[in-house]
Structure formats: C-alpha cells, structure tokens
Amino acid sequence: MTNSPDNTDLPEKSGPATPGAMKHREPGSERELMFRNRVPTGDSLARDICDHCGFIHYDNPKIVVGSVVTHGGRFLMCRRAIEPRRNFWTLPAGFMEHGETTAEGAVREAREEANADIRIHDLLAIYNIPRIGQVQIMYRAELASPEFSAGPESLEVRLFAWEEIPWDELAFPSVHWALTQFRSVAGEGAIAPFSNPEGETGNAFPKTAR
Amino acid sequence: MTNSPDNTDLPEKSGPATPGAMKHREPGSERELMFRNRVPTGDSLARDICDHCGFIHYDNPKIVVGSVVTHGGRFLMCRRAIEPRRNFWTLPAGFMEHGETTAEGAVREAREEANADIRIHDLLAIYNIPRIGQVQIMYRAELASPEFSAGPESLEVRLFAWEEIPWDELAFPSVHWALTQFRSVAGEGAIAPFSNPEGETGNAFPKTAR
C-alpha cells in the first residue's frame, strides 16, 4: 500500500493535518499566511480558513483501494521499496485518485505496484483507521494473466502459498486482517463484507490466530 | 445528503478542483500565489503545487456516509433546506469527517439532519460517482427510538411507506438506487453489498422500475 502507515511505530505522513498549522508563504516575504481553525458560516465543524482570502481547506478522510489477489490458491504480495515500512510485505493498494471508481483504483494499484493485470470479483472489506484518516476498501481479485514483476514502489513481488506468507514481516495490520478474512470465506460466492476485526483499530498487529 | 450533487443539472460544488486553478492571495497584494499542476518528485500523477513554497495540495475523492433508515417498514427521509436540490427529498447522509468511522459518520448525519437516533445494521452499498469525486458508503439502519425532527439542514423529516415515497422529488439518483436496492433485499440477513446499478454513473435518475 502506498503511504498507508496504520502502525503506531510510523510517522503519520498521511494523517489528518494539525488544525490551524497549514502555512502558505508569499515569495520573498517573511510573512506567512496563516489558516485559522474556525467554524465557517453555516457549517457545524471547525475548518482551516485563510482569514485574508477566505479560502476554506476541507480536510476529509482519504480512501485507500486495494485487493487480495490470488492465482492458483497463492497470494500476490509486494515487498515495499518506499517508506513507511520499506522492506515489509503488503498487498497491492494505495490512495484512490479522481476520475476512477474504487474498483478501477484497485486495478490501477496492482498494475503500478506489481505490473499485474487483475480481475476484481467482489468487495472483501471496508476498514476504518480514524487515527490516520483512512478508509480502506479491499476487494477479492485474481490475476488475469500469470505475469507480474516489481513496479517502482516494490522491491520484489511474489506469490505465496498460505503457509509461506511472511506473517512477521507484514507492512500493516490491515494486511493481516485482509488475508485472514479472505481465507475465512474462501470458496464462498457472495459474501457480506468485513470491517475491522472486533476491537482492532489498526494501532497494532492482531494477536489472533491466522 | 450534504452537498452531494450527483445530478448534471447542479453546480459541482463538491467536485474535484480544476487543476492549477487554486489561488491564495497575500493580504493587500494584487499578486496571486498560483498553484501549478505538475508531478511531484517520486509521484506518478500531477498535483497542484505552489512553485514558491512547495506546498502540495493532494486532492482526493471524498467519502459520503449515510443510511437507509426504516421504522415499522417505513423509510426515514429528509426534505433539504439547503442547496443543491433544496426542497427535494434525500436520505440522511453527508461528508465523512476525521476522527470517526464510516458507520459513526452515518449515525452522526442522521442525528444532524433528522434529530434521529439510529442503529446501524450492515453495509447496503458503495456508490462511485467519479464526476464529482465522491464515494458514497450507505448502510442499512433502523430508528433506535421513534422520535425525529428536522435538523438545520432539513425543512421536514418524514417516515414514508414504500408507496408514499416522493419518487419525482428525490434529490439525487443515488437516493433512488439506495431505496430500490434496499427493497430488493428486505428481510435478508447477510447481504453482498451493491454498487452503482448497471450502466448508471449518477448523471441522471434511472429509468428502471422502482
């Protein structure tokens, strides 16, 4: 996953901005244009607003789209080439962009991170990680063709049998959730999607069995 | 729904910003600080970047959270007090905020728009409306207590029997989708969630039967 540090050890690069901390500076000037955190007229929550020009910076949770991709019963995983969690294993996933649907975004991420052409089946889970302002939408998918290789954000891409998955080297708790929940409904056609495992907020890896 | 104009007749108030069009001005100055649309180092897509201070404005799709709320087989709906689509009927829904989960956001919106206390059951649908940069996450829910009334963004809140729903006065196509899809699985316990009806992008109301 791209920049999705749902682990407390990591800097919150993608987390919500600190209210009122956003700055924008005139070139050559020492004066910084401050955004103040106050409630706009007609709104109910405080937003960062430029007191001079009135620009309102609406900062909302971001969507991560990704998938559990299988091929012949094995799982496609990427070893991250970038921080956070460089060298750790993840599923193809990343921030959704404008102009695409959630499923199209998951397909694009698999192409970018694993040079893989995937076929989306259905929704596996929606995970909420409010601490870093993320909603992760994860699909069940399969490789449309058996070719894949490391994209620029991956050091290595591999297919793992279930017993081979590097559980102690997973990048994020939600990678663990997605793999184990996928496994629990393997073979079932239509499923009710999962959310965070009971009591899990993404701050740590689950202690539950795999 | 708050500011969710998924109808072509409406201004795209909540849609993606036009690349490079964002401005921010020094007080008392005629000079505008322009954001230029270019690809940041290590990124793959163009972003709005201030050429002077390097501030990168990441603009991503926003999440709308809401619910189809029933009570005794009737449907809770709100007549909008605000633009877009003032006077038209909608479901309690709005933009997700930081610090909450998607389900918590849906509960909050029902409280704000209908002074209603609701109990979330399960996920009904995820709708993609790329034209306005929205992903709508809709739940099945019921009233936890029979009291409700119009919040500040509603002119009127009512429970409608299915036959009474004001189909010609719905605020957005996705209200139509959510109601008809809800109806199609009424009574079913665990469901696979829906997405956009086949071929529907949110640009117009569906021609399909109710």
Image: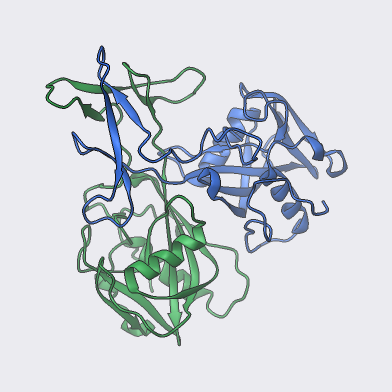
Chain colours: A blue, B green
Residue A104 location in percent, x, y?
Answer: 51, 41
| Along the viewing direction, whichever of A86 and A131 lies nearer the viewer | A131
Q: Quadrant of residue A164?
A: top right
Q: Is residue A110 left or right of residue B162?
A: right
Q: Is residue B123 left or right of residue A9?
A: left
Q: Is residue A150 left or right of residue A2?
A: right
Q: Quadrant of residue A168?
A: top right
**Residue situated furthest front in the rendering:** A30
Instruction: Please report the residue visible at 41 percent of the width from the left and 71 percent of the height from the top.
Output: B179
Q: Is residue A169 left or right of residue A94?
A: right
**Residue situated furthest right in the rendering:** A163
Instruction: Please report the residue visible at 83 percent of the width from the left and 53 percent of the height from the top.
Output: A209
Q: Is residue A201 above or below residue B54?
A: below
Residue A48 location in percent, x, y?
Answer: 32, 41
Q: Is residue A110 above or below residue B190?
A: above
Q: Quadrant of the N terminus of chain A?
A: top right
Res. B106 in view: yes
| Along the viewing direction, whichever of A45 and B195 lies nearer the viewer | A45
Q: Is residue B202 above or below residue A93?
A: below
Residue B18 location in percent, x, y?
Answer: 28, 33
Q: Is residue B207 above or below residue B23?
A: below
Res. B208 in view: no
Instruction: Please report the residue visible at 53 percent of the width from the left and 32 percent of the height from the top.
Output: A13
